[in-house]
């Protein structure tokens, strides 16, 4: 198979790669290069570190790259050989049009996964720009919409660290996948997730604290209810097996025990059996009961609202006290 080529005026072939550069590269404020001197200084310190007794981690690479200003990195993706003629031009045109970064390249020969594509960002510390490029790959280019993409530092490449020759993690950032289909969060793998505001692993906010799709439900029938709930208000979800219209009905009540609506029927068909199963499991242990709480996360349009659901296990002793205080806050399954 002859090497892949691109005849576009902004593309050229070199070293087994086809490169493309934005025509405004020289004038763009974000354009920069990692100087050879900085790369050499980092390599010297890296080689000294490897000879020491220090247990090396990926954080050492991050710290060295930052210290020596070796900041370039790239999002990695693959294009199948039979799709290269259609998918690579999408990347190239986005580079030329200024929608991605300033530079990208594609291997001129495929491996078993296809052609390797690198979409560059000049400064991996600029998390806003790194994340913007990932979103553009999804939204503007239309590739890897539902996949996790990984970002590798040039500093790691310069240190000759690859998956086949090192036990160290080779990529620094992740973004995308089923837990972040909108590519809204950049995951820094050298940090720990704290599941709290200010989490250093997740940018701009902790992915672990974001409502997942399976925990999000719509409240319907609000126009028939006499009570309402404001955005941010806590509510309680209660199974309603005696409901003559739907035995899987799940009603939503406010802190005063007043009905504000029901979970949409298609979702209730999933949620109600889940609540029942969890409650029966806890009852068999005779130690805890289940509380299903919700937080209203949208403003009512008069017809429906969204609620983020959380399942809590509490002791029978606590549960009994809560019943005395406010019976509507406890889910009791018949």
Image (cartoon, rainbow, N blue to C red):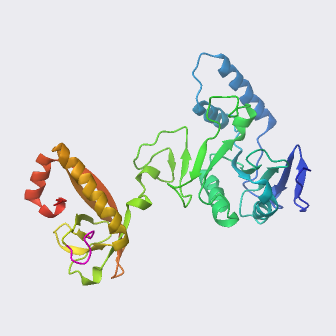
Residue 15 in percent (x, y) is at 88, 43
Residue furthest to the left in view is 324
Q: Is residue 307 visible?
A: no
Q: Is residue 214 visible?
A: yes
Residue 257 in percent (x, y) is at 16, 69
- Residue 284 placement, left or right of 63: left
253 versus 63 height, above or below: below
Asked if the stretch drawn in magenta spans residue 244, the answer is yes
92 versus 262 height, above or below: above
The secondary structure that most of the magenta stretch takes on is: loop
Residue 252 in percent (x, y) is at 25, 69
75 versus 155 height, above or below: below
- Residue 5 placement, left or right of 66: right
Q: Residue at x 75, y 34 (%)?
A: 158
Q: Quadrant of residue 250?
A: bottom left
Q: Nearer the viewer, residue 247 or 139?
A: 247
Q: Quadrant of residue 266?
A: bottom left
Q: Quadrant of residue 183?
A: bottom right
Q: Residue at x 71, y 30 (%)?
A: 42
In the rendered structure, which segment of residues is drawn in magenta? 243-249
């Amino acid at each position: 198979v002859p090497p892949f080529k691109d005849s576009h005026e902004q593309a050229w072939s070199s070293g087994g790669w086809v490169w493309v550069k934005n025509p405004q590269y020289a004038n763009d404020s974000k354009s920069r290069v990692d100087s050879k001197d900085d790369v050499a200084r980092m390599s010297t310190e890296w080689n000294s570190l490897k000879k020491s007794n220090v247990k090396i981690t990926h954080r050492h690479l991050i710290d060295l790259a930052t210290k020596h200003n070796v900041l370039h990195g790239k999002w990695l993706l693959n294009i199948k050989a039979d799709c290269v003629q259609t998918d690579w031009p999408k990347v190239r045109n986005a580079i030329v049009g200024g929608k991605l970064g300033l530079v990208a390249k594609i291997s001129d020969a495929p491996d078993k996964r296809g052609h390797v594509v690198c979409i560059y960002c000049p400064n991996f510390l600029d998390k806003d720009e790194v994340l913007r490029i990932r979103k553009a790959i999804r939204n503007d280019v239309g590739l890897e919409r539902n996949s996790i993409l990984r970002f590798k530092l040039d500093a790691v490449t310069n240190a000759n660290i690859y998956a086949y020759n090192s036990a160290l993690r080779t990529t620094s950032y992740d973004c995308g996948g089923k837990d972040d289909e909108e590519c809204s969060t950049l995951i820094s793998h050298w940090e720990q997730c704290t599941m709290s505001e200010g989490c250093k692993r997740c940018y701009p906010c902790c992915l672990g604290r974001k409502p997942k799709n399976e925990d999000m439900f719509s409240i319907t029938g609000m126009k028939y209810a006499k009570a309402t709930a404001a955005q941010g208000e806590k509510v309680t979800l209660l199974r309603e097996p005696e409901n003559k219209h739907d035995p899987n009905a799940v009603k939503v009540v406010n802190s005063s025990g007043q009905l504000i609506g029901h979970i949409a029927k298609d979702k209730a068909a999933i949620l109600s059996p889940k609540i029942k199963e969890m409650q029966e499991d806890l009852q068999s242990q005779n130690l805890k009961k289940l509380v299903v709480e919700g937080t209203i996360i949208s403003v009512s349009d008069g017809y429906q609202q969204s609620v983020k659901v959380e399942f809590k296990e509490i002791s029978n002793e606590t549960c009994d006290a809560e019943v005395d205080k406010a019976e509507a806050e406890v889910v009791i399954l018949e």
